[in-house]
Image (cartoon, rainbow, N blue to C red):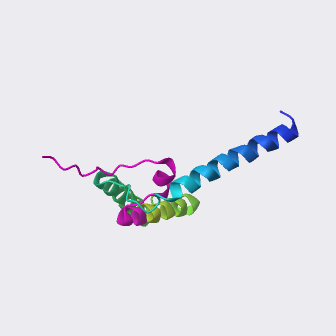
Amino acid sequence: MSGSNLNSYFYDLVRVIFVQYLQTKKNTMKKNIGTVDRVIRILVAVAVVALFFANIISGTMALILLALSVIFVVTSIISICPIYSFMRLSTLKENKVKL
């Protein structure tokens, strides 16, 4: 690929991703995390915090894992995962009325 073709390719890729983001932005505030997913996220966060305070993990890796743990807890509390919204995924079961 020449330089101009490569630039055009990346421009098109960024444009497609941005358009998809704008289309999914309408649905970003819908809950998309189910109960099992929430429990798993909180358990992983608790495990990381326990490993940190037990001095099993330390340094940069510990800080990265602690930051991810905070994200897991926040997304579990609000039941919204922006990555799931962007990818149009949901682990939330829909309530269906049976007659």
- 99 w.r.t. 81: above or below: above
Quarter of the N terminus within the rendering: top right
Image point 57% across, 54% down: which residue? 21
Q: Residue furthest front?
A: 99
Count of labels shown? 0
Image point 29% across, 55% down: which residue? 35
Q: Nearer the viewer, residue 24 or 84?
A: 24
Residue 86 seen in render: yes
Does the magenta segment cover residue 43?
A: no
Q: 91 left or right of 83?
A: left
Q: Nearer the viewer, residue 54 or 41?
A: 41
Q: 92 left or right of 68?
A: left
Q: Residue furthest top?
A: 1
Q: Which residues are magenta?
A: 73-99
Image point 58% across, 56% down: which residue? 22
Residue 54 seen in render: no
Does the magenta segment cover residue 87?
A: yes
Image coords of residue 92 (percent x, y): 32, 52
Image coords of residue 34 (percent x, y): 32, 53
Q: 15 left or right of 76?
A: right
Q: Residue furthest left?
A: 99
Image coords of residue 54 (percent x, y): 40, 63
Q: Quadrant of residue 46?
A: bottom left
Image point 69% across, 44% down: which residue? 13
